[in-house]
């Protein structure tokens, strides 16, 4: 078995959506070895954290005030069997459709699975200024396929909505169906098979719609 980290890390200067209202990630030293009043050389850090940077999970509360917050989603949603839809042939601004998912997954999918959509977009664009302008994206038909086929979570290395679409229609379709969204993942090209064990537990934070997650898959898990 092989453990593969599919998370995008957190660091100052990390990729962040280019909008004036979108906070950046930052680190401030609340205490350094030089300022430690006890004289033992401790370090304490203050994280300026916006949960939609980096790899994170979104719950229904993101779009619906009466839906579950991130700490209310059952833990078994984030751990279990996952199918990788290999759509690595997708290129700039290509849509991911329900038909794409059916073709990629028809031989392995089981209701109750988690879905990971692979386009390899981060391999080509992560760290570039146009990262958010070029990615493949999910369509409503893809969200319909997930809801109709019993997906319990979806993660992707592309983005959820077409970059110029502000309607949030794909988010709304998924979250209204009770399907949390694992955004900003990578390294799906390192996965050897179409079925893996996923572990993507979000940080337990009350009264919020999203939280960072350290997402890994285990390739070769004995299902």
Image (cartoon, grey):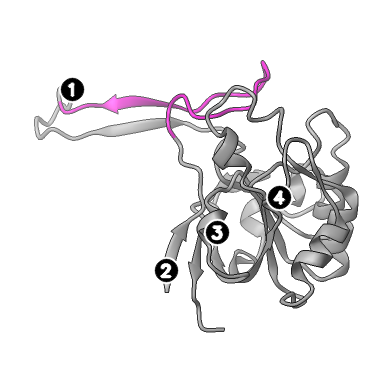
Secondary element at tag 2: strand
Q: Write down the residue under mark 2.
A: 2
**Separation (CA) of disc 4 from disc 3:** 25 Å
Q: What stretch is highlighted in magenta?
A: 11-33
In primary-sequence order, the first of circles 2 and 3 is 2
Contact flag, marks 2 and 3 (Cβ < 8 Å): no
Q: How crowded is mark 2: few (under 14 residues within 10 Å), some or many (20 or more)?
A: few
For residue 87, above or below residue 169 = below
Relative to 13, 119 lies left or right: right
**Separation (CA) of disc 2 from disc 3:** 16 Å
In primary-sequence order, the first of circles 1 and 3 is 1
Q: Nearer the viewer, mark 1 or mark 4?
A: 4
Q: Residues within 10 Å of mark 3 (few under 14, many from 20)?
A: many
Contact flag, marks 1 and 4 (Cβ < 8 Å): no
**Residue 100 magenta:** no
Q: Write down the residue under mark 3.
A: 200
In primary-sequence order, the first of circles 2 and 1 is 2
Q: Which of marks 2 and 4 is in front?
A: 4
Q: Write down the residue under mark 1.
A: 35
> Can residue 122 be seen in this snapshot?
yes
Q: Nearer the viewer, mark 1 or mark 3?
A: 3
Relative to 187, 12 lies left or right: left
> Can residue 176 be seen in this snapshot?
no
Secondary element at tag 1: loop
Relative to 125, 94 lies left or right: right
> Which of the two residues, 105 or 70, is positioned nearer the viewer here?
105
Predominant secondary structure, magenta span: loop
In primary-sequence order, the first of circles 4 and 3 is 4
Q: Residues within 10 Å of mark 1 (few under 14, many from 20)?
A: some
């Amino acid at each position: 078995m092989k453990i593969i980290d599919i998370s995008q890390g957190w660091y100052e200067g990390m990729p962040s959506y280019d909008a004036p209202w979108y906070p950046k990630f930052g680190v401030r030293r609340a205490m350094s070895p030089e300022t430690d009043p006890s004289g033992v050389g401790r370090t304490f850090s203050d994280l300026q954290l916006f949960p939609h940077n980096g790899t994170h999970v979104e719950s229904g509360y993101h779009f619906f005030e009466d839906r579950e917050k991130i700490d209310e989603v059952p833990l078994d949603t984030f751990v279990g069997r996952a199918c990788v839809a290999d759509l690595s042939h997708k290129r700039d601004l290509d849509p991911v459709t329900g038909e794409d998912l059916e073709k990629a997954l028809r031989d392995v999918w089981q209701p109750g699975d988690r879905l990971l959509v692979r386009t390899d977009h981060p391999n080509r664009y992560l760290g570039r200024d146009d990262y958010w302008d070029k990615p493949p994206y999910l369509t409503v038909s893809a969200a319909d396929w997930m809801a109709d086929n019993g997906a319990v979570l979806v993660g992707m290395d592309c983005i959820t909505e077409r970059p110029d679409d502000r309607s949030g229609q794909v988010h709304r379709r998924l979250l209204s169906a009770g399907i949390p969204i694992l955004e900003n993942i990578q390294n799906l090209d390192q996965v050897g098979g179409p079925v893996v064990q996923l572990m993507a537990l979000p940080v337990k934070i009350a009264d919020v719609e999203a939280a960072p997650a350290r997402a890994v898959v285990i390739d070769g898990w004995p299902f």
